[in-house]
Image (tube, rainbow, N blue to C red):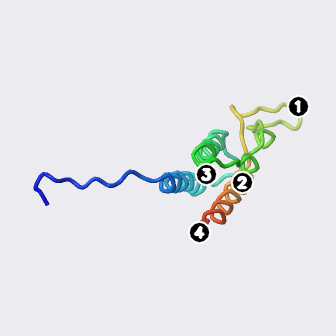
Amino acid sequence: MPANFHYLPSPPTERMTARDQLQRARARIKALKDNLPDSYEVESTWVQEYHDAIDGLESELSLQLTEFRLPQSALYQSVASSNYLTGDVTYRRGMWCQVTVLLQKADALLYYLSDLYGESAR
């Protein structure tokens, strides 16, 4: 082999590209699950991150994953404090979602992808 020869890997095939996109989205979803705060609810930014991972899967793998998204109705204003005597309620900024709802959707998507591509879901 000549001294100036450099091995360049062949360009990825469509299957490898699809597999890479699948692995990246699964990694994002798993990391999101592993890093969710230990609380009853999370800010909508967590839901947006999850939906961004779904967007990548849908566009790169030509999948239709609507049923794995959280519906708008899963987001709500979170009560920061309330006074039962006066009926006053103060809400936290932004929209919130119950952690269990997000986890259920993420688990369902991971199980679907594992069945579809024959790999471990978790």
Q: Quadrant of the N terminus?
A: bottom left
Which one is earlier in the sequence, the residue at label 1 or at label 4?
1
* Mark 1 neighbour density, 10 Å: few (under 14) some (14–19) many (20 or more): few
Using the numbered discs, state the Cα–Cα distance from disc 1 to disc 2 in whole angstroms.
38 Å
- Please name which of the two marks, 1 or 3, marks the residue nearer to the observer: 3
Q: Is residue 15 left or right of residue 8?
A: right
Q: Which residue is mark 4?
A: 120
Labels 2 & 4 near each other (Cβ < 8 A): no
Instruction: Judge by depth and name the residue closer to the eye, 25 or 3.
Output: 3
Q: Residue at x 83, y 36 (%)?
A: 83
Q: Is residue 3 left or right of residue 52?
A: left
* Mark 4 neighbour density, 10 Å: few (under 14) some (14–19) many (20 or more): few
Using the numbered discs, state the Cα–Cα distance from disc 3 to disc 2 in whole angstroms.
17 Å
Q: Quadrant of residue 51?
A: top right
Which one is earlier in the sequence, the residue at label 3 or at label 4?
3
Amino acid type, callout 3? Pro
Labels 3 & 4 near each other (Cβ < 8 A): no
Labels 1 & 2 near each other (Cβ < 8 A): no
* Vertical relation: 24 (above or below) 93: below
Using the numbered discs, state the Cα–Cα distance from disc 3 to disc 4 in whole angstroms.
24 Å
Instruction: Judge by depth and name the residue closer to the eye, 101 or 91.
Output: 101
| Count of all numbered marks drawn on residues in the image | 4
Which one is earlier in the sequence, the residue at label 3 or at label 2?
3
Q: Which residue is mark 3?
A: 37
Q: Residue at x 60, y 55 (%)?
A: 33
* Vertical relation: 85 (above or below) 122: above
Q: Which residue is mark 1?
A: 86
Q: Is residue 29 left or right of residue 68?
A: left
Q: Which residue is mark 2?
A: 105
- Please name which of the two marks, 1 or 4, marks the residue nearer to the observer: 4
